[in-house]
Amino acid sequence: MARPPDLAALSLFDVVARLGNLTRAASELGLTQPSVSYQIRQLEEGLGCSLFERRHRGVDLTEEGRILRDAVQRALGTVEDALATLRRRRAAPTVGLVTDFAFASYILLPRLGRLKERHPDIDVRVSASQVEVEPAGRGIDLSVSFGQLPVGGRGVRLLQERVIALCSPGFLAAHGPLDDPAALARAPLIHLDGPERWFSWPSWMQAVGWPWRPGVEGLHVNTFTLAIEAAMAGQGVVLGWLGLVDGLMDAGLLVPATGRVAVSEAGYILRLARTAPPAALAVADWLKEELAPFG
């Protein structure tokens, strides 16, 4: 045969094989019976074997016909599955969400499976940025950013800023106890450099009622993820935002260096675009429900 049969010929063969009758197959396909018979003969000639045994009241598959039928049904099933997936993707609403790396890593991504269980028809596209982005539609339907909830402004606070000093269990065993300012000053501290929107070590000390005493030169990093990784590696004491680090504490990777917690009115603020579609509203409601225990 010069080339393999095309999909149309195999689809026609599948209908004849399923119905076992050329006339009924022609009726289902919207063709004439002679046209169906001709195309089957063309297929058989191209393959060099008989696919059907002609009977008075219909046709039966030969051994070669059964082999081809099984292969065609598997192939057509795979094609149909792919087409169904494409149809679902085209129909599924897409929600664009932008947030910072810490919220994406420690809050959002670990929970996306639960979101998919709740809303299997919604696709969420997550973008991480340390720069605050205004949700204005056109691919960004909602944002979660750290800061103050503006008076009279749009937004809902998902997480209030509550910060505790953390370190690895091994670090605490080697340097602890650390539950007083003098002891903490003797330990290397991990500093998260950046805007003054969140607690730094000096402001945290002030908030918990301890004097700031610069001590051992510590490590400076520019992302919360790096700070947490350094603390888990035993490099020092880090400030951890409750709500972000709970999973790491539950797993025993980080432990409180002290029992003191600093609290502010800042936190993670959820904002929706004014033109947010219903799917974005559903994702926002899910986020508020998920983080209600931490709010």
Image (spheres, rainbow, N blue to C red):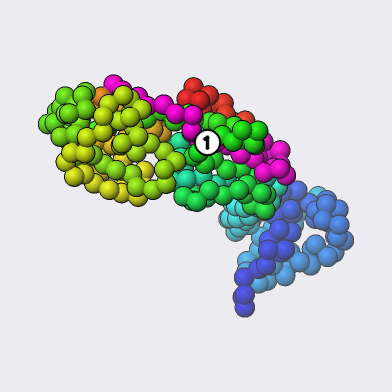
Q: Is residue 263 magenta?
A: yes
* Left or right of 245 in this view: 10: right
Label 1: which secondary element: loop
* Left or right of 278 in this view: 185: left
Q: Is residue 201 magenta?
A: no
Q: Nearer the viewer, residue 86 or 111?
A: 111
Residue 22 location, x and y as percent? 80, 55
Write down the residue under mark 1. 148
User: Based on the displayed image, in which of its 4 quarters is residue 241 positioned?
Assistant: top left
Q: Amino acid at mark 1?
A: Gln
- Dot 1: within a 10 Å radius of its alpha carbon, few (fewer than 14), some, or many (20 or more) residues? some
Q: Which residue: 26% across, 29% down?
A: 211
Residue 12 location, x and y as percent? 74, 59
* Left or right of 273 in this view: 102: left
Residue 100 location, x and y as percent? 47, 45
The image shows residue 3, relative to residue 273, as above or below, that is below
Looking at the rendering, the stretch of residues picked out in magenta corresponds to: 259-282
Q: Which residue: 85% across, 64% down?
A: 34
Q: Is residue 119 visible?
A: no
Q: Is residue 19 visible?
A: yes
Q: Which residue: 50% across, 51% down?
A: 131
User: Residue most toward the bottom?
Assistant: 2
Q: Which residue: 74% across, 53% down?
A: 15
Quarter of the picture containing the N terminus is bottom right
The image shows residue 23, relative to residue 250, as above or below, that is below
